[in-house]
Image (cartoon, rainbow, N blue to C red):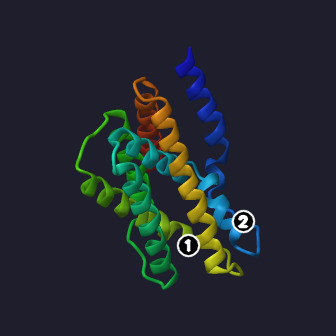
């Protein structure tokens, strides 16, 4: 009964916001930056997924994966703001959700540098998407600070959940549901 309730709570949390991933209603930029990762299910699931995978890998991966993601997400955003676009960014984002979901569901064990490289590639795409959605009048620094802090918090939430639920099937179930959601993002309407 607990896995069903967890899945239902997760669905209630993220599905109503899936259509609102692009905020654009705060002129300062900080609030927009903070809201962007929270209001798009694709971003939310990938960022929590980084924390869940880091928890399952343990050791230095608990820090390396979130740091790699946040750092390269900032690089991706900076490149995007300079007009350097990553081709197929939405496909990369969907792939990040699927890939991270699979990594969590199957407890994929790879060396930490390889895991950090993988999340860094995904982070470039997320950074590009964040930059593309920055409101015209927003401060780029405030906007980046907003999405950077919230991304780190989502990684921390995933890490905390993964650690607290270690030894149960719940992280694996969450990973499987995340991968399925990523497939919907990739191939859905």
In the picture, measured across the screen, residue 172 lies left or right of residue 23, that is: left
| Residue shown at 43% from the left, 49% from the top | 50
Vertical arrangement, residue 76 with respect to residue 121, above or below: below
Residue 52 figure quarter: top left
Viewer-nearest residue: 110 or 45: 110
Mark seen at residue 31: 2
Residue drawn 33% across the image and 46% down it: 59
Read off the residue under disc 1. Answer: 132
Q: Position of residue 23 (x, y in %)?
A: 69, 62
- Residue drawn at point x = 47 percent, y = 29 percent: 165
Quadrant the N terminus occupies: top right
Q: Residues within 10 Å of mark 2 (few under 14, many from 20)?
A: some
Count of numbered circles on the image: 2
Rendered location of residue 96, percent (x, y): 40, 52
Instruction: Tell me where residue 55 appears, x and y as whole percent.
Output: 40, 41
* Residue 189 visible from this viewpoint: no
Q: Earlier in the sequence, mark 2 or mark 1?
A: 2
Residue 182 image point, x, y percent: 44, 45
In which quadrant of the rendered view does residue 56 lie?
top left
**Mark 2 to mark 1 CA distance (whole Å):** 16 Å
Disc number for residue 122: none
């Amino acid at each position: 009964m607990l896995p069903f309730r967890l899945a239902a709570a997760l669905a209630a949390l993220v599905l109503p916001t899936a259509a609102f991933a692009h905020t654009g209603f705060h002129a300062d930029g900080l609030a927009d930056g903070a809201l962007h990762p929270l209001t798009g299910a694709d971003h939310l699931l990938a960022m929590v997924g980084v924390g869940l995978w880091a928890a399952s890998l343990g050791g230095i991966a608990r820090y390396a994966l979130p740091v790699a993601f946040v750092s390269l997400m900032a690089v991706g955003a900076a490149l995007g703001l300079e007009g350097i676009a990553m081709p197929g960014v939405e496909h990369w984002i969907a792939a990040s959700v699927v890939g991270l979901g699979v990594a969590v569901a199957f407890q994929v064990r790879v060396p930490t540098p390889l895991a950090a490289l993988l999340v860094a590639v995904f982070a470039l795409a997320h950074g590009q998407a964040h930059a593309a959605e920055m409101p015209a009048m927003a401060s780029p620094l405030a906007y980046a600070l907003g999405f950077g802090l919230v991304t780190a918090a989502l990684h921390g939430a995933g890490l905390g959940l993964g650690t607290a639920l270690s030894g149960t099937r719940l992280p694996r179930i969450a990973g499987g549901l995340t991968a399925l959601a990523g497939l919907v993002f990739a191939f859905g309407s």
